Amino acid sequence: MDWGQIFTFTAESAFGTQAMYFAIAAIGLNIHFGYTGLLNFGHAGFMTCGAYGLAIPLAGGEIWGFEWGQQAMWKGVLIGLIAAGIFGLLLGIPTLRLRADYLAIVTIASAEILRIVVRATSLRGLTGGSNGINGFTTSFQNARPSFLDDGFLGYSSRQSWVLMLGWIFVLFAVGFTYLLIHSPWGRVVKAVREDEDAARALGKNAYSVKMQSLVLGGLFGAIGGMFFVLAQGSVQPTPQDFGTPKTFFIWVAVILGGTARLWGPVIGSIMFSGLLAFTDTSLREAVRADYIPDSILDGVQVGQMRFILLGLGLMLLMVFRPQGIFGDKRELALDAR
Amino acid sequence: MSRFTELKAVDPAILDNVPQEAGSAKPDAILTATGITRRFGGLVAVDVNHLEVQRGLITALIGPNGAGKTTFFNLITGFDAPDEGSWTFEGKPMGALAPHKVARQGMVRTFQLTKALSKITVIENMKLGAPSQSGENFFKALLHPLWRDQEKDIEEKADALLERFKLNHMREEFAGTLSGGQRKLLEMARALMTDPKLIMLDEPMAGVNPALTQSLLEHVKSLRDEGRTVIFVEHDMDVVRDVSDWVVVMAEGGIIAEGPHSAIGENKAVVDAYLGTTHDTALVFNEETTAKIDSAKIDSAKIADTAVTTEIEDPQ
């Protein structure tokens, strides 16, 4: 067992690109679920909007006679955000007047529809079909400041540039959420979460507030998707990248950290990535050092095993600390009344 | 604050010359409803021909279970839409207004099942009631200085109300930790934060111990003294006798009697609605009416009542 390597790998993952973009997306989901009580099971859909919205203009392409060259970065970001905003509006208009469960059904289906649409063969010129889009990060990497040319703390130069911007954005997003939630707007949002009718009876437009929250959280999801593809260097319409599994991993991060807590999604994402890497490397090391015989677990099966262990950990968390790492136990006690 | 100063107390004697019959005209009506019907499938839950509510006084709305009192509240406050009918508040037509817009007009309601916002502190519950806090706008919310001064005023007002309702010791607690009676108090105090002209209380005394009932009654009376109009639904006749200036009786969706509480007890239609028609008259064999009135007494009416509340949970 090489504990040094296990530790390094765990630490690198805990603050690596996955934790970073998870944190951004999870902040959005926390606005949805934690503060407003919206059951959004299609967060990957918002990430898809951001990822493709960014990658398509940056990569250049051609479809139905239109042709465009490689566009500036800001245009891609803007298009990604607009796409996510429209996606949020489309989801919200029919469902936010209804009970919470309808939003859950519609979001989970819409995110899948979106992922299947972008991989359509007929859209190959636009989205690259099932091949996705590659090589759109050149201009982004060219803008990298020279002090990162040798990388940073063991991260490669390309990674460290994305990571630096990403974690700065995480701080910005936390500050932004803090300002919003500690304002009268945040008060209305929480009131809507607790009881929509009570909020309405006091003259608050619950529908409008829920829509604002859905779009705002969606924008954070889209930005998370942008950082994801910038770090990965390509957009792939696979289920792991933009399907339901991604949505639920982000849910895990939110719940792990504690819902409706400012730092909950950030800490949750760090822990999620860290734990996943820790179980993965330590199992691998244990298999290699023959602490675990091949008859029980071999190197290939480790990839599956780590999710089983993570699920077990999550179950234990729900049993012994149901409010998440940062949650307030008093709040949960109120639910039981 | 301008809305606050408009209010002035009204002498209950103003109703002395009002005819004691269903649908009678009031000297100065704040709320006028005409021809309001709400059907749930075959069941006619509400069928009110005409109702006027006097400004500045306390009107009690009573009736057996399933009479349509809560449904009528829901219709008037925009939580449910009637099949037919129109109503005006302060002379303005109100039909088809969304609930939050109704509340902004100065007509605020509480709920039969108290809606304290559990995971929000008592003081935040109160501050939520404040109307026109500009920080509730998404973009202004981010700029603290834009709404800081307003927030300070709101907090002062909220603290004053908490003191009046004797909830100030619970200020920083989650509303979910309050007792049932305290929640009723909180809901009433929170409604007052909106500076309502008309406050509609749906069973404010239900599940409250007798000691607290007295203090709730005093609060209801103090609303009248401030010049606010109060409509409340209540089953406890002692309460009705104690605070109401005018009583409206509903049965089977319609209004069957109106008058001061002293007159209502002797009203035959009212006694019939509560006890059945055959108690002192000869049995008149009229299948339709007996069947209808029986259903008002027995639990089937209660079932209809729950059906009503479930339908209302998702308006529109």
Image (cartoon, rainbow, N blue to C red):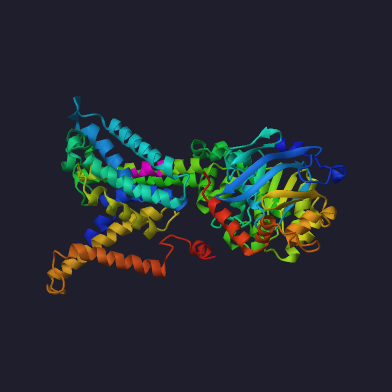
User: Left or right: where does residue B276 sit relative to residue A43?
Assistant: right
Q: In which quadrant is the N terminus of chain B drawn?
A: top right
Tag count in the figure? 0
Q: Is residue A165 visible?
A: yes
Task: Give how far across and how far down residue A36 sits, in percent.
Answer: 47, 49
Task: Give how far across and how far down residue A62 sits, in percent.
Answer: 18, 29
User: Left or right: where does residue B7 sit relative to residue B150?
Assistant: right
Task: Give how far across and how far down residue B285 sits, in percent.
Answer: 72, 59
Q: Nearer the viewer, residue A180 or B272?
A: B272
Q: Nearer the viewer, residue B280 or A147?
A: B280
Identify the residue shown where x is 23% and y is 34%: A56
Identify the residue shown where x is 19% and y is 47%: A156
Q: Can residue A3 be seen in this view?
A: no
Q: Quick check: B225 above or below A264?
A: above
Q: Give the range drawn in magenta.
A: A215-221
Is A216 within the magenta? yes
Q: Which of A295 and B38 is in front in this view?
A: B38
